Image (cartoon, rainbow, N blue to C red):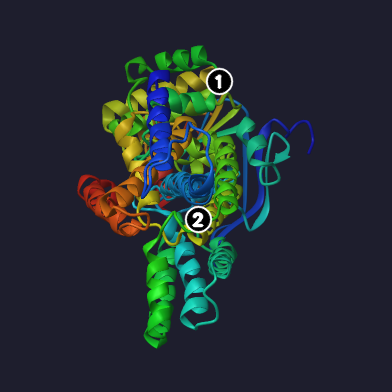
Amino acid sequence: MRRSHWLLGFGVFLTLVLSHLIWGVVDIAVLEPLEGVHREILLHVRIPRALAAVGAGAGLSLCGLVLQTWFGNPLAGPSVLGVSSGAGLGVALLVLVGLTSSWWATATAAMAGSGLVLVLVLFVAHRFRTATALLIFGLMLNYVVGAMITVLQAEAQQDALQQFVFWGMGTFGHGSLSTSLGLCAAVIVAGLVLRTMHRDLDMWTLGPLTAQSMGVNNRSLRWRIVALAGLLTGGITAACGPVAFLGLATPHVVRLLTKERSHRVLIPLTALTGAILALAADWGVKGFGGMEQGWPLNAVLSLIGGPMVIWVLISKTDRLHD
Amino acid sequence: MTEANSQRLEAKDVDIRYGAEFVLRTAQLSIPVGGLHLLIGRNGAGKSSLLRSMAGLQPIQGGVIALNGHNVHSMSAAERAKRVAFVASTPPRTSQLRVEEVLGLASSSTARAAEVLAMFGETAWAQQRMDALSDGQAQRVMFARAVLQETPWIFMDEPTAFLDVPSRKAFWKHAVDVAVQGTTIVLATHDYEHLAGAVKLASVHLVAAQSVKALDPSGPPQGWTERMQG
């Protein structure tokens, strides 16, 4: 990657961030002294939303990259461990049973749900001899948790069901400034930790035996990946709802953009690209919808991500058979 | 561990089993430093399991395996990587790293990496991606990577299983060159008839009937085949 490419990427990123801060239901001149309603909108709506998009986009994309590397499977993504579904179950239990509808309670329930699933995955992961077995376990967990949510939905009151469905659509616009800042800080820490693992991840692509013979502690690497991916996905799902496709699709977009395959380059580039894609998707949501709540985020992401997965399936069928 | 047997690989009373089924039971094996050493045996006899265990990459259920006086299963992965390099039977098929990046993972010296690549006659591949190479080419790269790890021991598990005859000959020539330079090479292979006629072997070990037996390395490979049939 040339320095000019990085500068271009950061330029696009900053342009998108600024566009989010400036344009919306009302336009704000961010370079002039702010006061009154404009200041409130910027501090409590625009900046938290832009930060949530950056944090969620970068974090989920890093999860996707590291899980695709670990499983050697281009269709692996943050949701495969069942952590997103676990967060959904936590929210479903709270909202559909009608206990409370406060944002903080919902977020706590999502974190608790994803945390419980993560603990379950951590508890059983060592029993699986292969990465594929763990992948299948995650898929089965998704089915089971999904079925439990469906049962809760069938028994729920109309207004509670509506609230849950809205949460399930995903949004970057629900978090406070402190939540979004916390999310971004967590993603930066996770990214720096991942960056220290780049050589291990490169060696892992040569196969578990080869990686181990080159000095990689495979068991430790697996725990670190499961913990990082699980906690990031849980935290982001808590803050933004279950955000679709970003984790799965961004690593493929990055592979289209560059020939580099070393994780030394892929990790920062995936984080940057994920943030750009999330900001672009959210900008599309606001622009096309014409108002702050706009179109559902997951509808926009699915319209982009769905064809992306089909493309991966068609172009990499041979690899998937391996 | 005495000085006499510290410069060798020593496997004592080794048990390897999968569930209740023993592959090896109280197996003994001793391999001195230097030269090219073969593990032979029929499919499923336990050659690969033994080789992985000797490299410390697979746990054993009984006994001890010591490399130059150090228990291979007590070392950290990083310590082990300084003593043993390993070439798996199947070359990586999904890695998209460039050849020079793979070699760079084993050695920080680009000059040394270029030297080894040249020794293997593969300088043209440096910029190639691993998933663009044939199995034979990828396996030679993995051997070059093992050499770059600069370990006193290299273990290879049926490294020529996917190679055509010319590629096998080239591969064995490189193995001999590396052994001549002082690295001890231990390999599991079915290709012993070609090897026995072409190079001087330091030792040959037959893995059969849950045990390991030393054979005459200068003997005719047909004799080894007969021993294998029982």
Q: Nearer the viewer, mark 2 or mark 1?
A: 2
Q: Assign the N terminus of chain A to one quadrant of the image.
A: top left
Q: Residue at x 47, y 75 (%)?
A: A92
Specify the farthest residue to the right: B2
Q: Nearer the viewer, residue A49 or A61?
A: A49
Query: What subunit carries mark 2?
Result: A
> Residue at point 46% right, 47% down?
A46
Residue at point 26%, 51% (across, down): A288
Residue at mark 2: A236
Q: Quick check: A299 left or right of A99?
A: left
A53 or B210: which is nearer to us?
A53
Q: Nearer the viewer, residue A101 or A234?
A: A101
Amino acid type, mark 2: Ile
Q: Chain of mark 1?
A: B
Q: Is residue A187 visible?
A: yes
Image position, residue A164 (x, y; %): 42, 73
> Quick check: do tags 2 and 1 share a chain?
no
Residue found 34% across the figure and 29% down from its top = A258
Mark 2 neighbour class, 10 Å CA radius: few under 14, some 14 to 19, many 20 or more:
many
Q: Secondary structure at mark 2?
A: helix
Q: Which residue is mark 1?
A: B108
- The residue at the far bottom in this view is A155
- How far is mark 2 from mark 1, CA to CA? 38 Å
The quadrant holding residue A100 is: bottom right
Residue B230 sits in quarter: bottom left
Most extreme residue toward the front, as rendered? A36
Q: Position of residue A47 (x, y in %)?
A: 50, 45
Q: Amino acid at mark 1?
A: Ser
